[in-house]
Image (cartoon, rainbow, N blue to C red):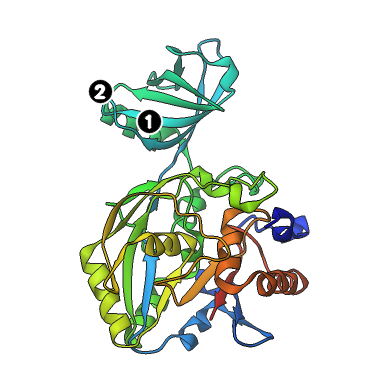
Amino acid sequence: MDVSRFDYNLPKELIAQFPSRKREQSRLMVVDRRNSGYRHLKFGRITDFLRPGDALVVNNTKVFKARLHGKRPTGGAAEIFLVRRVESESAETWLALARPSRKLKPGDRVSFDDGRYLTMLEDCHNGQWKVGFTSRSARDRIISKWGHVPLPQYIRRDDQPSDIRRYQTVFASKTRVGAVAAPTAGFHFSKPILDAIRKQGVTVHEITLHVGPGTFKPITVDDIHEHTVDPEFAELSAETAAALNQTRFNGGRVFAVGTTSVRTLESADIESGQIQPLSRMVDLYIKPGHRFQVVDRLITNFHLPKSSLLVLVAAFAGLDRVVDAYAEAVQERYRFYSYGDAMLIL
């Protein structure tokens, strides 16, 4: 399937640079796979589409300040974008993206103004490096003092103090720190909205997928089937798996909040019709032809053209339907991407 079919034109002014003033005040476009036409609502109306016995699945990963600005030994600037900790003899070895990579070499120290530093350990090519911190406390101090919220590049501004709170979901867990990009479909949920959903008799369940920078990786091959997605750590507990199995047994529907929740749920093994827990790296690439085994409904943001996320949405809703829906969203002046509006696919 040619990647050009997943392209679309988007006026730059529709790329949201800031979040909506209140989370639930973002817009919601409702797409029904069975019928033509669309509904245009405020996100707070999401409760209209849930019923007692349904399950809402959210990603509780927490974004950390992964973008570090330091100095090379020559005094020139260096950006170290932390991705994830890697297994090594040192407990504080991390995989990172470095710029300018060609001006760095193994053994170089990238220093910060308080005298702390990290060390470039190994060039893994294509801008990827292994870097090392002197200790866990030094790592935490550097991230806390010198780290920046890792806003995506299409948000063309520096991060601001408000992004620490808004580039994060309200259900992000302090014990699940590890994402360098947010599960943005979750941005629209406020605590009052979640409380209202629970009062309806809908259960809310948390899974974890630590979103990596690969979420923004464009498809650069002509045939989408030749693309691969980067592995990310995912966890679906035995308790959550059992609860979702009960929901399905009772005839309830599973609403996935975001493509990260979809990938986690659909990566789980199904044995004798039962969802199994998982705790591992996952690299499931969902594309048209995928048979969805767990997810019944999808709440998602509007994604970049020629991206694996848009391909996933097309796999769920149908390519023609998604192409038409995106054209409708552009015409109706929806806000796109991370800080943009939402779509509910029924």
* Disc on the earlier residue, 2 or 1: 2
Tell me the quarter of the picture where residue 271 sits: bottom left
Tell which of 41 and 271 is nearer to you.
Answer: 271
Tell which of 268 and 59 is nearer to you.
Answer: 268
Q: Is mark 2 on a helix, strand or loop?
A: loop
- Residue 89: give its label: 2
> Which amino acid lies under the numbered mark 1 shown in the image of this protein?
Trp
Relative to 230, 317 lies left or right: right
Relative to 80, 103 lies left or right: right
Tell which of 247 and 285 is nearer to you.
Answer: 285
Number of residues whose C-alpha sits closer than 10 Å to that of mark 2, classed few (under 14), some (14–19) or many (20 or more) = few
Question: In the rendered structure, are the residues bearing label 2 and label 1 in contact, judged by CB atoms less than 8 Å apart?
Answer: no
Q: Which residue is drawn at 76% across and 55% down?
A: 12
Q: Is mark 1 on a helix, strand or loop?
A: strand
Relative to 60, 27 lies left or right: right
Number of residues whose C-alpha sits closer than 10 Å to that of mark 1, classed few (under 14), some (14–19) or many (20 or more) = many
Tell me the quarter of the picture where residue 343 sits: bottom right
> Which amino acid lies under the numbered mark 2 shown in the image of this protein?
Glu
Tell which of 69 and 216 is nearer to you.
Answer: 216
Q: In 3D space, how far apart are the residues under numbered discs 2 and 1 (Cα atoms)?
A: 12 Å
> From what the image shows, is residue 197 above or below residue 144?
below
Is residue 150 visible to us here?
A: no
> From what the image shows, is residue 219 above or below residue 332?
above
Is residue 299 visible to us here?
A: yes
Q: Which residue is drawn at 52% across and 19% down?
A: 71
Relative to 301, 265 lies left or right: left
Residue 191 in the image: x percent, y percent? 38, 72
Residue 320 in the image: x percent, y percent? 70, 72
Residue 45 in the image: x percent, y percent? 52, 84
| Location of mark 1 (residue) | 94
